[in-house]
Amino acid sequence: MAEEELIPEDEAFGITERLRADVLEAVEAEDGPGVAGLLDPLHAADVAHLLEQIDARQRRELLTVWPGGLEGEVLSELDESLREEVIEQLAPAELADAVRELESDDVVDLVEYLDEEQQEAVLDALDAGDRVLVEQALTYPEESAGRHMQSELVRAPEDWTVGDAIDYLRSDVILPDQFYHIILVDPRLKATGYVTLGRILSHPRATPLKRLTEDSFRTFHVEQDVEEVAQAINHYHMITAPVVDDDDRIVGVITIDDAMMFLEEEAEEDILRLAGVGEGSLSDRVIDTTKQRFPWLAVNLVTAILASLVIALFEETIAGLVALAVLMPIVASMGGNAGTQSLTVAVRALATRDLTTANVWRVIRREVLVGLINGAIFAVVMGVVGVVWFGSPMLGVVIAVAMVINLVVAGLAGTVIPVILERLGVDPALASGAFVTTVTDVVGFFAFLGLAAVWLL
Amino acid sequence: MAEEELIPEDEAFGITERLRADVLEAVEAEDGPGVAGLLDPLHAADVAHLLEQIDARQRRELLTVWPGGLEGEVLSELDESLREEVIEQLAPAELADAVRELESDDVVDLVEYLDEEQQEAVLDALDAGDRVLVEQALTYPEESAGRHMQSELVRAPEDWTVGDAIDYLRSDVILPDQFYHIILVDPRLKATGYVTLGRILSHPRATPLKRLTEDSFRTFHVEQDVEEVAQAINHYHMITAPVVDDDDRIVGVITIDDAMMFLEEEAEEDILRLAGVGEGSLSDRVIDTTKQRFPWLAVNLVTAILASLVIALFEETIAGLVALAVLMPIVASMGGNAGTQSLTVAVRALATRDLTTANVWRVIRREVLVGLINGAIFAVVMGVVGVVWFGSPMLGVVIAVAMVINLVVAGLAGTVIPVILERLGVDPALASGAFVTTVTDVVGFFAFLGLAAVWLL
């Protein structure tokens, strides 16, 4: 295949196919300085992406030829499924060098899914202060704000002025590598507001910080789901989300760049779950991928057999008129597709909180109406096809009526099933598809063959 | 339905069902001050969300009872499908008040899809300087960085020190409402790096700004796709992406909070396209939704008829053994599901640039192998079901072999078709589904019925 086609010329970021080829050539030639010369100038995210693109043998060779080259940032950027593999290949001193560069929240992300031995190796490489922060974060539940927050932050008494804040920042105090807000606290360390650095810099020294706080300010509990925090950051256009403990004391922040990553992961998960893929990435091994795909296919087999049982009820009808066997998948397939449309809209609307108790009946009514209208149109089309193809007007009527029934049911099931699953606490993205297509298959075959049995034979 | 169930108690953000009910009650009672009292303290994003939840009649009444209450921010947060409706109900003076509060990039987002008359009304409300900025932005292509950038930014000569920068920021200069970086420019205004405010504040006055620039710095052309810029912001953890003109001169910035919104929109689009829904939101009218859903259902009808034509080839075979009609949907359905799994992974991997020329053959091989393994497992299961259900060992063999063939083809088609579509410049999220399920239906029916015709009759 031509090299340039899968990544277009006007790419906004990432490494070129040319660069990747050069790196692999240098690796093949065991040209250490050559590899370093190509990789050292790259952003860690690009090095990680390159490692994900090449195969396991090439990765091993690259890490051998480029000793000490791997920064901690690259480990943090790397796909989870490859971290264990890459960490295994680093010498203990190399691993220690790499992780010492990272902020505590990045170390937490890095170690949380490592096996115990590797986790220990990484923790041992940290200095005592960082180790305490990481171990503290690991005590919070998975996917919680506490687990993923950055502990480094800047706070100030709420009665300070702009001048106080600037003097403080300009003093010898150690500041985080990146920060965008100063968080105001009352005497009990309760967070009461935040001020952006830009606002501080653009106001006179005498201005009280309290006068410059932002509307978007709100706090999140350490045990809050980090994806919810990320959604709130997006909803309110926040840059920093303050995380507080049970007493409302500020203990950390979730920053917008991390929030962006969590939201991306969530959308990705929803897409894959809707398709019955579960977790997983291109770097997974064949056996892992097979296992991920298997459960949904197994569920689908059961639902397909259910549909077949419905068909089996009408074996005699089909034996009497084989045209029914030819046409019946059309009704089921149209229902399945219409149902998938409705359920996808419903699942996403639930995820983004657009579908609520306030409008659920309106949405159900709309979906049913849409099913009715589209069903009527396709009923006419298929009625005509049935008559022309098989020369039987009554067959045309049967398929037309079955089509309308199935598309209305698809709209109804596609909305009601995700809503019910959500209320039951089951992830609707994961489970809706199986239920909805079972309904549309069963109803589709039953309506079509049942009407045929009554009206045609 | 109980009020509290669709939005759980521990919500991180948004309005409660209680508040919504109170607002509607006050609207019903035409209690203007009551409505204002409830809505004025809310963040604009929450007011917009409330307007999206209620129906058209309630929205009209709310806007009548709450005159002058609607801020510009609310318009900008509102779902596109509702903006025209809401703007129509505002008095010209009200509209003018609302839009004058907005930054120029928000006005662009607001007006770009309005009809000409409304666009004119909004532009007329702006002062001359803002109007020029907005009209300038509208000359860039839709979805380009230039169209969506914020023109307000802070730049500084690249040879300045920390002290120079602080003195400049503390002088009487007018600064943007929100900014996180100072962008360094050379004497020709070419952007050469950026420094965060946090770094400036935490270094001695004598430090040259050049020494504090960030690794993540890179510039984007005004005509670059804004979604690509957003992906780059996410990839490199940038807070601000500088946008430059043909001469590399800095003309604006895309900020991370806008990038987050673009990425969310993109993921949403992909999800809906994969399900054949196209654009659309819960607020759309029945007729719009029907139109959005129709094309994909029409495509599906054609592919379903194609599959039926394959079945029609074997009418005699089915007449000879009706069990075939009972079992054939199982093979097609399993293939369709396995194909959807593969194509979803491929489509997302293309979108996130994880699937490239470097690994496309590896991924195809993996998908085929996964299809082979899962196919073999389900072949055994269905073989046994075939024998037990219909008492024919040969029927078991036929369905087993057909199952393996179809799952291998599903893995192959599910990967190759999106890759080919991407190369042809067709959005693989939109078109892959129809092609892949056509392939798995046709192959599924043909393999199963064809083998049956040869081996069973």
Image: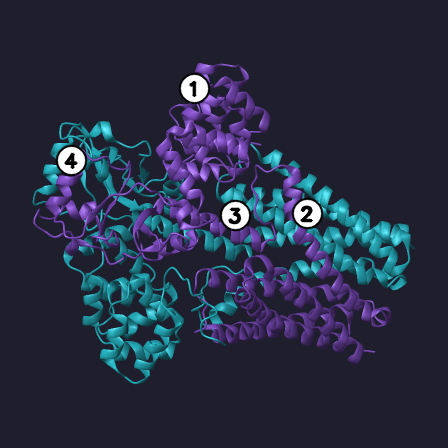
Chain colours: A purple, B cyan
Q: Amino acid at mark 4?
A: Ser
Q: Residue at x 79, y 61 (%)?
A: B312
Q: Disc 1 on helix, strand or loop?
A: helix
User: Which residue position is annotated with label 2?
Assistant: B410
Decide which of tag 1 and tag 4 comes sooner along the chain.
1
Q: Is residue A321 visible?
A: yes
- Give a yes or no on whether discs 3 and 1 share a subunit: no
**Outermost residue, bottom direction?**
B29
User: Which residue position is annotated with label 1?
Assistant: A36
Q: Quadrant of residue A299?
A: bottom right
- Give a yes or no on whether discs 1 and 4 share a subunit: yes
Label 3 – label 2 distance at C-alpha: 20 Å
Q: Amino acid at mark 1?
A: Ala
User: Which residue position is annotated with label 4?
Assistant: A171
Nearer mark to the viewer, of 4 and 2: 4
Nearer mark to the viewer, of 1 and 4: 4
| Percent coordinates x, y for residue A424 in the rendering | 55, 66
Q: Chain of mark 4?
A: A
Depth check, front residue: B64 or B135: B64
Q: Disc 2 on helix, strand or loop?
A: helix
| Percent coordinates x, y for residue A29 in the rendering | 53, 14
Q: Residue at x 19, y 56 (%)?
A: B131
Depth check, front residue: B209 or B323: B209
Q: Residue at x 44, y 20 (%)?
A: A68
Q: Is residue A10 visible?
A: no
The numbered disc on residue B426 is 3
Nearer mark to the viewer, of 2 and 1: 1
In this picture, residue B96 sits left or right of residue A421 = left
Q: Are marks 3 and 2 in contact (CB under 8 Å)?
A: no
In this picture, residue B93 sits left or right of residue B376 = left
Quadrant that contains the N terminus of chain A: top right
Estimate how packed mark 3 is, as few (under 14), some (14 to 19) or many (20 or more) residues with alpha carbons within 10 Å: some
